[in-house]
Image: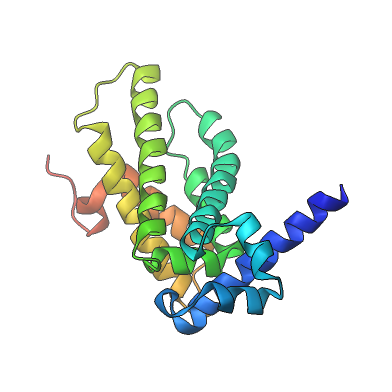
Amino acid sequence: MAEDRRTRRTRKALRDALVGLVLERGYASITVEDVTERADIARATFYSHCRDKDDLFTRLTKDLLDELGARQRPLIAENAVGFTGKPVLELLRHAERERDLYRIILRGEGDGKPLRMFVESCVRVTADEFRGRSERNGVEPRLDPGLLARAWVGEQTAVLQWWLEIDDPRPPAEEVARMLLDLAVHGRYWASGFDLPA
């Protein structure tokens, strides 16, 4: 139990150190020594948890995605048709809580590897859900679910990055989720102010 608490404290210190340093100086300029000094841990302790700073950033990204998935799964499963906006709202709330880590991921720090991990994970989950939703409702998608997932995740990622970089006052998560839901349900044509052709 004490070991678990110590491990959690060490991981949190490493996470906070890496994120803080990247926001201050950019990923490329920081070293393992910078991270251990900021976290106030020995280099040997760092290496007992990670191979290098890339491995640390990858682990932080994976942990973030695992936590996001755990928060979204029940919301996705509760509605067979989907398009409730709840998973998007949960993404926004999670990102708001973990703002700094999301910001460095979405900025493409670390040669863009964490950003690619984030996007590919979200695309996989979304494409699977789009396919499953079509099967459950006996409908045939008009576009490939993989392409639909990429378009949807791309929109969310771009909006999320914009939203997290705004200093207060930031539009409420609920308002942003509602706009994204409207876009998903009605499309860009409607969102641009046009009526659908008869």
The spot of residue 122 in percent (x, y) is 41, 44
The spot of residue 120 in percent (x, y) is 36, 45
137 relative to 1 in the view: left or right: left
Q: Height in image: 70 above or below 77?
A: below
Residue 169 seen in render:
no
Which residue is pictured at 46% across the width and 54% down the height?
177
Q: Which is nearer the eye, 115 or 190?
A: 115
Q: Residue furthest left?
A: 198
The spot of residue 40 in percent (x, y) is 71, 76
Q: Residue furthest front?
A: 44
Q: Height in image: 104 above or below 192?
A: below
Which residue is pictured at 87% across the width and 47% down the height?
1
Residue 99 seen in render:
yes
Q: Which is nearer the eye, 180 or 160?
A: 160
Q: Which is nearer the eye, 115 or 55?
A: 55
Which residue is pictured at 34% across the width and 34% down the height?
127
Which residue is pictured at 31% across the width and 41% down the height?
149
Q: Residue furthest bottom?
A: 24
Q: Which is nearer the eye, 98 or 5?
A: 5
Instruction: Choose top left, top right, bottom left or bottom right for residue 176.
Output: bottom left
Q: How many marks?
A: 0
Q: Residue furthest right?
A: 2
Q: Height in image: 50 above or below 99?
A: above
131 relative to 46 in the view: left or right: left
- Screen quadrant of the C terminus: top left
The spot of residue 126 in percent (x, y) is 38, 38
